[in-house]
Amino acid sequence: MALEHRFIDTNGVRLHCAVDGEGPLVVLLHGFPECWYSWRHQIAALAPHFRVVAPDMRGYNESDKPAGVRAYAMSELVADVDGLLRAFGEHEAVIVGHDWGGAVAWSFAMERPNATRRLVVLNCPHPAIFVEHLRGNRRQLARSWYMFFFQIPWLPETLLRLGGAWAIGAAIRRSTVREDSLTDEDLRMLRAAASRPGALHSGVNYYRAAFRSPDAETLWPAWLRRFIHGDPPPALLRARPEDWPRIHAPTLLVWGEADIALGKELTLGMGPLMAAPLDIKYIPLCGHWVQQEQPELVNNYLLDFLGDAARESEAAPAPA
């Protein structure tokens, strides 16, 4: 198959998807402030072995942009992915996510264990680990300043949209280790996607929705939780890693070590969160945009980790 672009209806929204290949389904979930294009290298590498679907997640690029912060709650994002699987006639898939797509991938694997064949996350901490570090790691708290800035209504997206999303391209270029890893054309594509009407507002709403989730309440002082909920706090608050559902899919975590927003320490202490093997691959001299900065290495890790599924695909008889 050649790369094609489709619109898929799922969970009440219409998502634009880049689709290529045949075989077991692999879903690639991008982060902020990107789109399907951030997976261009991985689509080409995986398509000979898998059916690859890289959506513009809700709110981004050509996909629907529902109004309101609640439309970007994690439950909605997980349901979007669940609907994609059904739309492609599958009950399970390999779920791959980077940045915000990684957060959705972690949550999907926890909430839909039977639908998660394997899990791959790139430069995104497990939410339990991230919340823990926001509570007690001052360096990570400082690195995450932009998440708090994004809580201001309208101002962040207005500034990011100026000059054809110039700040988006500059931030991506500045935070890569090898600046030539993304060409001017690559940055133009990402800026154009971010400049679509409503895209940056929707992208920032992911952060606003996250701060309104029950899990974010564990960041509040104990007295404030008692004031809101009484004592004891509701059981749905997950204050410790042991309170989270464990991951039952074999998992690969790929981490660019020079990420300026997320420290390497966020990859540690994950044992209580896993009920399946976890493999962590660190990439030195690589920043946050790992699958674009080191595409060949990331592709090799993906193909090695997904080798069993790829061999099953190649051994399967051709359709009559």
Image (tube, rainbow, N blue to C red):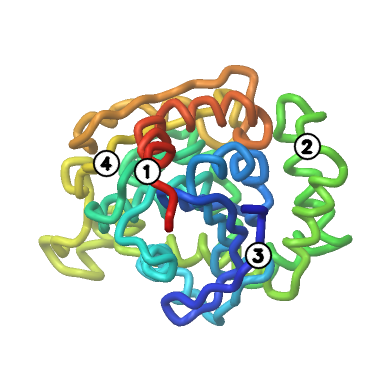
From the image, tell me which residue sits under label 2: 182
Query: Distance of mark 3 from mark 4, alpha carbons?
Result: 29 Å
Q: Residues within 10 Å of mark 2 (few under 14, many from 20)?
A: some
The location of residue 251, given as percent across then percent down, is 33, 35
What residue appears at the point 75 percent right and 59 percent down from the top-left corner?
A: 160
Give the Cα distance between marks 1 and 2.
Answer: 37 Å
**Residue 5's disc number:** 3
Give the residue number, with chain letter if any, for mark 4. Answer: 249
Choose between 195 and 158: the one closer to the eye.
195
Crowd tier of the residue under label 4, counting other residues whose Cα lies within 10 Å: few below 14, some 14–19, many 20 or above: many
Q: Earlier in the sequence, mark 1 or mark 4?
A: 4
Label 2 SS: loop
What's under tag 2, amino acid-wise? Leu
Q: Are marks 1 and 4 in contact (CB under 8 Å)?
A: no
Q: Which label was assigned to residue 46?
A: none
Mark 1 residue type: Ala
